[in-house]
Image (tube, rainbow, N blue to C red):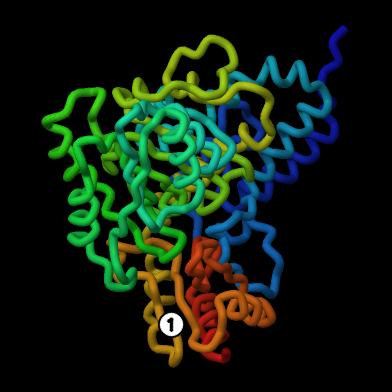
């Protein structure tokens, strides 16, 4: 006789969790296998209701969510549900529930991204996704990958490793001299002007964690479409994007961005389970990628073929459905408006502080939720440490040229922003 997972503790846990979430209007079917239906509720939650879904330490102003997110209640509940099932009877739970749960994640992701589930590969992080994409992309001897001086080392390293293996090259170009005065025209012009006949891959980051600059991806994609008119499939320029700091902020779909590939982790602005991410590819672009790690089973879609097989932190991966549904329940347009509102407030008030220099553009079109700045006479590390002593969470940009960084998100209020500015002023 096969032992079934114990239901006593699970039922008690799910009952308590379900009551709490239903009271906040943030959950539909907490205990189901097919993902949450929270996005179908008629009334979107208030910002107070959203904040109550998190267990962040009280007494702190949390402005570092761009780095690693706290899990909201629906995600925590899903992780615990799957963990209990796996701990009680791992083989049975994996075989009976796993395929449905993974399909539910892909459905929720596709709904959020405005695309087909067939074109999404699941990964564990942005870095993993970039490594898989650039290792497998069709870059040949004599061709080049064009990236920028503003990109994170994971992009540079993955491209360089690929280029060295196949006899290709990597070139970096600057898209702006001063980030705070960057313009869409200058960015697009600098990139397109750097394209050469041998350019095969253009690797960009949507929102630069180094400066807070958000690239005008649609304009870039349109400009590259003109470049590609005279190219065949083997020489077509492929636009590949690290989108982690736009995902969960901007109200867009994958088709509207115009890129060929989009890579992101889900454990930042999206509030997804830690250790989750994805690669999305246009249906006709996936043929330019060869998988790196064998998939489980016989994959029937490009996304499944490029999803690494093996055993993962399944309780986290399967809870990703709730993260996408949580954001859709709040409303993508509301999310974008709220984060931009808070970021504008922060930039405007910081700009008025003596000895502070902003590096993030003021315009919404060229920025998202990351705000980078310096305080004259203090290193970025000292700024972050002194803010922490005032119970303000900030971060330092992990680049050769470092800045202090604040990132207001959905867990913040205008009062949080004003408290952070007052703390900066006190430095």
Q: Which residue is mark 1?
A: 350
* Residue 288 in the figure: left or right of residue 127: left
Residue 368 pos. (x, y %): 38, 61
Using the rendered view, name the quadrant where residue 79 is placed.
top right
Can residue 113 be seen here? The reply is yes
* Residue at the image point whose x is 62% and y is 43% from the top: 273
* Residue at the image point whose x is 24% and y is 35% from the top: 198
Of 290 and 407, which appears nearest the observer?
290
Residue 29 pos. (x, y %): 60, 35
For the C terminus, give its image quadrant. Answer: bottom right
* Residue at the image point whose x is 69% and y is 33% from the top: 313
* Residue 257 in the figure: left or right of residue 393: left
Residue 400 pos. (x, y %): 50, 65
Q: For mark 1, give the secondary structure.
A: helix
Of 423 and 8, which appears nearest the observer?
423
Can residue 338 be seen here? The reply is no
Mark 1 Cα shell of 10 Å, populated few (<14), some (14-19), many (≥20): many
In the image, is residue 349 above or below residue 269? below
* Number of numbered callouts drawn: 1
In the image, is residue 22 above or below residue 107? below
Of 296 and 72, which appears nearest the observer?
296
In the image, is residue 264 above or below residue 175? above
Using the rendered view, name the quadrant where residue 387 is placed.
bottom right
For the N terminus, give its image quadrant. Answer: top right
Residue 351 pos. (x, y %): 39, 83
* Residue at the image point whose x is 52% and y is 24% from the top: 292
């Amino acid at each position: 006789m096969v032992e079934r997972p114990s239901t006593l503790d699970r039922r008690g846990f799910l009952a308590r969790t379900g009551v709490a979430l239903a009271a906040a209007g943030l959950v539909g079917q907490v205990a189901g296998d097919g993902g949450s239906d929270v996005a179908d509720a008629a009334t979107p939650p208030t910002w107070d209701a959203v904040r109550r879904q998190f267990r962040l330490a009280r007494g702190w102003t949390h402005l570092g969510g761009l780095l690693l997110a706290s899990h909201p209640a629906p995600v925590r509940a899903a992780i615990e549900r799957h963990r209990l099932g796996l701990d009680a009877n791992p083989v049975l739970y994996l075989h009976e529930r796993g395929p449905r749960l993974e399909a539910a994640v892909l459905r929720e992701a596709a709904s959020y991204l405005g695309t087909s589930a067939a074109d999404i590969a699941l990964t564990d992080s942005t870095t993993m996704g970039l490594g898989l994409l650039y290792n497998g992309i069709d870059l040949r001897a004599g061709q080049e990958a064009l990236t920028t001086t503003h990109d994170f080392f994971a992009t540079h390293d993955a491209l360089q490793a690929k280029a060295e293996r196949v006899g290709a090259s990597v070139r970096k170009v600057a898209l702006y001299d001063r980030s705070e005065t960057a313009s869409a025209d200058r960015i697009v012009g600098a990139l397109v002007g750097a394209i050469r006949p041998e350019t095969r891959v253009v690797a960009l980051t949507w929102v630069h964690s180094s400066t807070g600059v958000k690239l005008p991806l649609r304009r870039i994609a349109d400009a590259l479409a003109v470049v590609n008119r005279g190219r065949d499939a083997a020489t077509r320029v492929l636009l590949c994007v690290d989108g982690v700091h736009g995902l969960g902020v901007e109200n867009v779909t994958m088709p509207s961005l115009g890129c060929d590939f989009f890579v992101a982790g889900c454990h930042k602005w999206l509030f997804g389970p830690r250790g989750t991410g994805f690669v999305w590819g246009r249906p006709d672009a996936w043929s330019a990628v060869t998988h790196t790690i064998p998939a489980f089973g016989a994959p029937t879609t490009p996304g499944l073929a490029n999803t690494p097989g093996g055993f993962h932190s399944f309780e986290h991966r399967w809870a990703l459905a709730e993260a996408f549904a949580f954001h859709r329940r709040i409303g993508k347009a509301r999310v974008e408006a709220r984060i931009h509102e808070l970021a504008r407030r922060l930039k405007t008030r910081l700009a008025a502080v003596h000895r502070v220099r902003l590096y993030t553009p003021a315009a919404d079109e060229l920025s998202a939720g990351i705000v980078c700045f310096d305080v004259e006479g203090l290193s970025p590390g000292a700024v972050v440490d002194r803010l922490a002593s005032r119970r303000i969470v900030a971060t330092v940009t992990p680049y050769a040229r470092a800045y202090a960084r604040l990132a207001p998100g959905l867990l913040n209020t205008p009062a949080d922003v004003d408290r952070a500015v007052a703390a900066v002023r006190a430095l």
